[in-house]
Image (cartoon, helix red, strand yellow):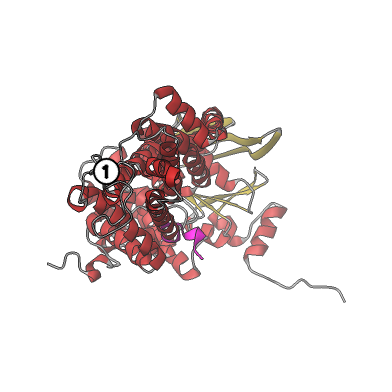
Amino acid sequence: MTAHLDIRDLRVSFHSGAERVDAVRGVSFRVERGASYGIVGESGSGKSTVLRAICGLAPVTGGEVLFEGRPVSEPRDAAFYRNVQMVFQDPYASLHPRHTIDRVLSEPLAIHGFKDRDKRIETALRDVGLGPRFRFAYPHQLSGGQRQRVAVARALILEPTVLLLDEPTSALDASIQAEVLNLLDRLRAERGLTYVLVSHDLAVVAHMCEQLMVMQHGQTVEVMTRADLQAGRATQDYTRRLLAASEGYTPMETSA
Amino acid sequence: MSALSREWLLSEQPTSRRQARLGQVYRTWLSLRSNWLAMVGLGIIVVLILVALFADVIAPYDPLAGGDLRTARLLPPSWEHPFGTDEQARDIFSRIVYGSRLTLMVVALVAVIATPIGLLVGTTAGYFGGWVDTVLMRTTDIFLAFPRLILALAFVAALGPGIENAIIAIAITSWPPYARLARAETLTIRDSDFINAARLQGASSLRILWGHVTPLCLSSVIIRVTLDMAGIILTAAGLGFLGLGAQPPQPEWGAMIAAGRRFLIDFWWVATIPGIAIFTVSLGFNLLGDGLRDVLDPKARK
């Protein structure tokens, strides 16, 4: 069976003048249809760049991205965007400050030539737990959690099958985090979506994903299942340190 | 119906596109209204527009044909001629009133020609980057390197004097600052997440430039254009003064000053009154521009 999303030896490097930065150095993973895959790592590990490379926002300099068994086109075509959408980290930066929610949601429908836009917008807002009263509001009139719901609605309005989630809750309060995570969980269950979730928060990944990959310096450190993670079965030193760090601050024992 | 009531406009939960847009406009208006200097500027410009519109009604005399050359030349201000008469026995008040049409035309046409060119060049250069940016911005630099009045002079000298050519000349020399401004704004937003999100929806470059980038550049460009209006009026007046703008007997304010300077000492009102008119309108645009900056550009807010 072909995987829904198959990443083979993905490499991404950026050039600035004579300098070359290898952000991703050979990462491979497969995500089956309906599965949820987590990518964990510290800042600068290249985890967000993997997502951006998949959807064409970062240049793929090596390796292959296969969607439903076929290599994606460069640049990505309309059909790809119909199927793969992304939710960004910062809901304060991902919505156009001068566009109403209505405009934000109707634009993708206009681009892809959908007809019954009014109905779809109302459904999309209801699906993410926002009422129709938010439809004509501007982003600055909404809270962070409401904005992220709008961003999720925008990603889902084209009815994609894959959702790329780039730290979707890290910019939110702890209480709102749970709300948005539950929303994402429910949507996946209802629609059979495939998720690729990037986070530095192991608790979030453990909650959301069946399988995860730990990244450092643009490379894969370890691939684990949720059970491995919950049992603390890490084989690599780096993963163990990450696990320890996620348990919160513990004072170091110093020998007197 | 509750349409256009204060509560309807300020509603946090608008129920239609129109209400949302009007509410946004009303909020901008409210914050502009609290700035009394900006309101003075706006008042001056509204008066200018009204005077230009109703020049036929307001002006008591013909602006081009004078009175009796033996008895009505260079009369000082009086009840009959509020601003006096000039050396052709024409009523200066009527000429000022009709001159407002020329001033308004210059300002409006320059704004209509220069602003879109500047926005288009700037946003395109900023958004695409690379060689597009290089070509467009070096061209802009070349235009920017010319002294404005001199280039306008050369242009008018080549095309022949006249108010239309003066307008084209001023427009050609005034777009480069808008292009630079628009490019700088575009550079700050082109890699932002909301632009990336639009790309991910499959939006074309044209759609992103027009629907997403331009609205965000527009406010700073509008502020800049308003502040430049004074300079545009002065350049037009300068060209008129040098005899390269409006041609006699057109009642252009700069040309009127030029005509009056010969008898500035003995008949001060001939040159002074159009000077005051230019000063007032320029000040009006500057005050409004400052007010608009406070309202539209949150970064510059005190």
A87 drawn magenta: no
- State the residue at coordinates (34%, 41%): B252
Q: Toward which corner of the image does residue A24 lie, by quadrant?
A: top right
Q: Reply above or below: B64 against A140.
A: above
The secondary structure making up most of the magenta span is: helix
- Chain at tag 1: B
- State the residue at coordinates (45%, 25%): B157
Residue designated by label 1: B70
B3 left or right of B208 in image: left
User: Residue A106's spot in the image, x, y percent?
Assistant: 29, 47
Farthest residue to the left: give it: B1
Q: Magenta part of the protein: which range?
A: B292-302
A35 vs A49, nearest the viewer: A49
Badge 1 amino acid? Arg
Quarter occupied by the N terminus of chain A: top left
Farthest residue to the bottom: give it: A256
A116 vs A15, nearest the viewer: A15
